[in-house]
Amino acid sequence: MAILVTGAAGFIGGNFVLDWLAHHDELVISLDKLTYAGNLENLASVTANPRHIFVHSDIANSVVISELLAKHQVRAVLNFAAETHVDRSITGPDEFIQTNIVGTFKLLETVRTYWSNLDEAAKNEFRFLHVSTDEVYGSLSKNDPAFSETNRYEPNSPYSASKAASDHLVRAYHHTYGLPVLTTNCSNNYGPYHFPEKLIPLCILNALNGKNLPIYGDGQQIRDWLYVTDHCSAIRRVLARGTLGETYNVGGWNEKANLDVVNTLCTILDELQPRADGQSYSTQITFVKDRAGHDRRYAIDATKLERELGWKPAETFETGIRKTVQWYLANQQWVSNVTSGAYRDWVNQQYQA
Ligand code: NAD
Ligand code: DAU
């Protein structure tokens, strides 16, 4: 028996594989296309683990995936693979449609064929868990209640629209074919191995390199931050106890304005690695042109997950953000490897450096 984790060389998928291996004895097959966001160094600590296999493949490759499913008698597929950066979806949406919609569809078809041929007991045990985002619900005004699972889907970016389409396909495969699916919709994650195109790692690295900390618009957009290992524990819980066909919102009860997040990072850096000139890193904050169609506020109501499955996050924003800054300070080799080549082209184009 084994589980198959797609997008396993990315930020959350990689953290999930490490977390899973620390909690379970089962074989884990990590599958990843290794796009610009996929990084095998995220899995370096488990490369020699006999309970771990890495396979380089696209989720759309039904030949590779059906062979893996049959050979290892896979009992669960967890789909983290996706194009994930909103800004990239604005400048180049094609890959988002290809992976997030067509790729998820192909994966569902491959999994459905495998699952339909299992014996009754194995069929009942099997799970397909789809990892999705709170962005499918659109944007909240200041006083709106947080997103619950019954909110309408109102995606606003090519990224969130492609994730919404994938969620609908997953739902349809349960309703039409009976595929045993679960979907999680999570808020913004942060923590180790976060690719530095996203706000928190970008600002930590820019601060240390004496660069501007780019704040889009007025910096008052709100995100609900969740430490990545809390997301991993939520997914383990949903996989073990979730009701088939249901969706579960996952969030950290940590709504913060972007400017406050970046100021917090600066305060921690001022303490842990003060600037040579004695000034605060916050002097590097720079307001830049806003993101097109920028969602104003996300907030997750994670009550269902707590009430039905007893899950709660372990980290507060204060504990999680400190651990995150410490991780980046302690892992400068990972940082310098990840910020070479294609990464520099993206940063130059996006911020016109
Ligand atoms: P990421 O960009 O760090 O990693 C995505 C991984 O998927 C990369 O390793 C990439 O190589 C791989 N991949 C891309 N296309 C592929 C394909 N066609 N076949 C196989 N692998 C492919 O993303 P992440 O932040 O780790 O996000 C993982 C999942 O969680 C995504 O589905 C995302 O929508 C969802 N999510 C992310 C957040 C967040 O804050 N990062 C929050 C909620 C939900
Ligand atoms: O809400 C979950 C989503 O969170 C995931 O589904 C996405 O995959 C993930 O990328 C993330 O999306 P965001 O767009 O919220 O994350 P990002 O880190 O890109 O931006 C966070 C906020 O910071 C957002 O309001 C935009 C702003 N921002 C971002 C960057 C990169 C800036 O102000 N400056 C920046 O340079």
Image (cartoon, grey):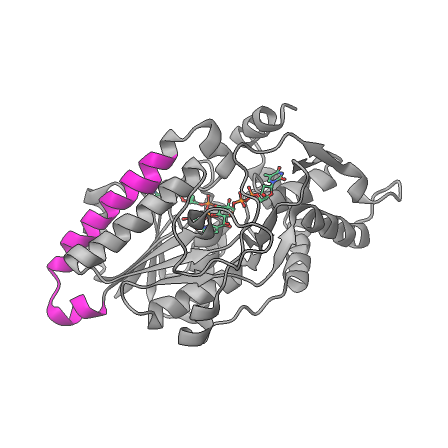
16, 162: nearer the viewer: 162
Quadrant of image for the C terminus: top right
Q: Nearer the viewer, residue 67 or 266?
A: 266
Q: In the depicted view, which residue is nearer to us: 133 or 68?
A: 133
Counting from the top left corner in percent of width and height, residue 195 is at 54, 43
User: At x 73% / y 52%, what residue is drawn?
Assistant: 264
Image location of residue 104, percent across then percent down: 29, 45
Instruction: Determine whether, in the image, residue 57 is placed left or right of residue 274.
Output: left
111 versus 62 height, above or below: below
Taking the view exactly as shown, the residue that stands out farthest to the front is 143
Q: Determine the residue positioned at 32% across, 35% down.
A: 98
Q: Is residue 99 above or below residue 244?
A: above
**The magenta segment:** 96-125
Whether residue 70 is visible: no
Q: Quadrant of residue 289?
A: top right
Q: Quadrant of the N terminus?
A: bottom left
Q: Is 2 drawn above or below residue 345 in the view shown? A: below
